[in-house]
Amino acid sequence: MAKLTHFEDGRPKMVDVSGKPATHRVARAEAFVRLPEEAARALAEGGVGKGDPLVVAQLAGIQAAKKTSDLIPLCHPLPLSQVSVELAFDPDAGQVRIVAEAKTKAETGVEMEALTAASVAALTVYDMLKAAAKGIEIGPVRLLYKSGGKSGTWERNA
C-alpha cells in the first residue's frame, strides 16, 4: 500500500520538497459537461446573454490553474510556465469536453493545476448555461497524463 505523503502521525502536513531536484513537469486532465437539450441549444446559439460560454470557461480554467495552491490547502504554489485549456462542444452528444494542460519546472508535479483548470472550466460552463437548463451534469474529471519527477511518466489507458 502506498504511503500517503500529506499525513504524519495522523495529522495533515505539507510535503517538504526542498531536497528534490526541479524537473520539467507536464500534466493533462479532462472534464466533461453533459448538457440537457435546452442547454445544448443555448450553447449552439451563443449562450444566454453572458457572452460565449466556452471562451469564458477557457479563461476561468487558466486563472484557476494559477490559483490552485489558494484552493487546495496542501498544494505547493508553482511557477507555471504554461497553461492551456481547450473546450470542444459536440452538439450531437450534447456535451463539452475540456482538456487542460499545465507545465512547470519545479520540485513537484502539476497534476492538481491541470485538474483544477479542467474542473473550474467545467463549472464555468455550468454557470454560463444554468439559466437555460438546471439538469447540467459535470464528470468525469480525471488525469490523462503526467510526466516528470521521480515517478516518471504516467498515461491513462483508454
Image (cartoon, grey):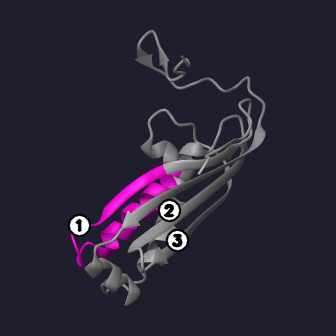
Choose top left, top right, bottom left or bottom right for residue 11.
Answer: top left
Q: Relative to residue 123, is residue 20 drawn left or right?
A: right
Q: CA distance from mark 2 to mark 1?
A: 22 Å
Amino acid bearing label 2: Gly
Between label 2 and label 3, give the one nearer the viewer.
3
Judge the density around disc 1: few (<14), some (14-19), many (≥20) Cα neighbours within 10 Å: some
**Which residue corresponds to the image point at 44% horizontal and 35% vertical from the top-left?**
73
Contact flag, marks 1 and 3 (Cβ < 8 Å): no
Choose top left, top right, bottom left or bottom right for residue 9.
Answer: top left
Residue 134 in percent (x, y) is at 21, 69
Amino acid bearing label 1: Gly
Between label 1 and label 3, give the one nearer the viewer.
1
Residue 66 in percent (x, y) is at 55, 54
The answer to whether residue 21 is magenta is no
From where the camera sits, is residue 70 visible? Answer: yes
Q: CA distance from mark 1 to mark 3?
A: 20 Å
Q: Along the polypeptide, which appears first: circle 2 or circle 3?
A: 2
Between label 2 and label 1, give the one nearer the viewer.
1
Where is mark 3, residue-wise? 87
The answer to whether residue 125 is magenta is yes
**Which residue corresponds to the image point at 47% horizontal and 65% vertical from the top-left?**
60
User: Which portion, as a residue range, is magenta?
Assistant: 115-141
